[in-house]
Amino acid sequence: MSNDSHPVTKKSIYEGSTQFKNWRYSPEKLVQVRSSLNQAAVAVIQRTFEAYEPGSSANVLFLTADEELLLVKHYIATITQLCGLFRFPEEVEATAISYFKRFYLKNTVMDWHPKNVMLTTLFLATKTTNNPISLETYTTHIKSTTASDVLDLEFLVAQSLGFEFSVWHAHRALWGVWLDFQSLPDTATDWPQAHRDAYETALGLFTVDRVKAIIQSSSRPPDVESVREVDRRLRLCKNPEKVVGSKAYLARKAEQEKKAEEKRSRKAAEVGEDDDPFGIELGRPKLVDDDDDDD
């Protein structure tokens, strides 16, 4: 048996999480993802405009990736306000914001308005963090909100999240560091180890300072007038397939209904063929025995 000189490094629980595998991005990568998503969305929506009204997209000023992000940040601040209204714990707030951000790494505001998605992600977060609230109570306390405003997008949100609802928040790790500090001895008996610990602590504090700087730079709510201007333009460049009553919306709905009807018909036909539990031969015994030799 050969001896491996390299020690096996045990992975942390976090490294086995879906967040570690699927939801970690560098600042540069986030910019790239949002830019690519925006460009793809604009191309699709332009084609939709042209398909139903040729030439109609020429004067449409579509949102940029930065303008989409501006709207997202505005509604993140609204999530915080709603959590204060309902007195939700910080875990609900942090989870809802994570869901909201992740949704818009897969979707565009020109398809799904952030206001509706915000309501859904917050309600979903109350359930996944085991802090449930009744739908009636939730909608009653939010002006001009109905149950359908919350539930209609719930499956879409869950699907966009890849049904990965567990979120590892930064405050959980910081709480663990705080608990570790409580168990530190008053004096160091192993000076080399103490030096290493001091280095790691300093490195950790440096990282915390960087995180703090990021939070401070992004925590200020966007300018309200800028948000209003972007939202006004959003009404003009929204995907017509998502605008109730538009030609594109009605055509898409008719196509969906046609496909649903075809699916129901196929299913009914399959059930009709399989409704005899004994099979064709056993279920229909012959009236004449082919091997009967009695005359």
Image (cartoon, rainbow, N blue to C red):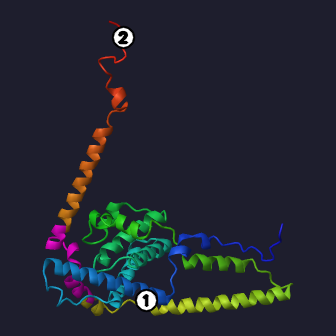
Q: Amino acid at mark 2?
A: Asp
Q: Quadrant of the N terminus?
A: bottom right
- Give the structural element (helix, strand or loop) at label 1: helix
The magenta segment: 230-251
Q: Residues within 10 Å of mark 2 (few under 14, many from 20)?
A: few
Q: Nearer the viewer, residue 104 or 168?
A: 104
Rounded to the nearest whole Å, what is the CA distance between mark 2 and mark 1?
A: 86 Å
- Left or right of 167 on screen, residue 176: right
Residue found at x 85% / y 88%: 191
Residue 293: give its label.
Answer: 2
User: Would you identify the image quadrant in which residue 178 lies?
Assistant: bottom right
Residue 292 coordinates in the image, percent (x, y):
36, 13
Residue 204 coordinates in the image, percent (x, y):
65, 87
244 in the magenta segment? yes
Dot 2 or dot 1: first in sequence order is 1
Q: Nearer the viewer, residue 234 or 130?
A: 234
Q: Residues within 10 Å of mark 1 (few under 14, many from 20)?
A: some
Residue found at x 14% / y 70%: 245
**Residue highlighted by disc 1:** 31
Q: Nearer the viewer, residue 108 or 36?
A: 36
Q: Amino acid at mark 1?
A: Val
Residue 35 higher or lower than 2, as above or below: below
Question: Magenta stretch mostly in which secondary structure?
Answer: helix
241 in the magenta segment? yes
Q: Quadrant of the C terminus?
A: top left
Residue found at x 36% / y 32%: 279
Residue 38 coordinates in the image, percent (x, y):
34, 85
Residue 80 higher or lower than 151, as above or below: below
Q: Residue furthest top?
A: 295
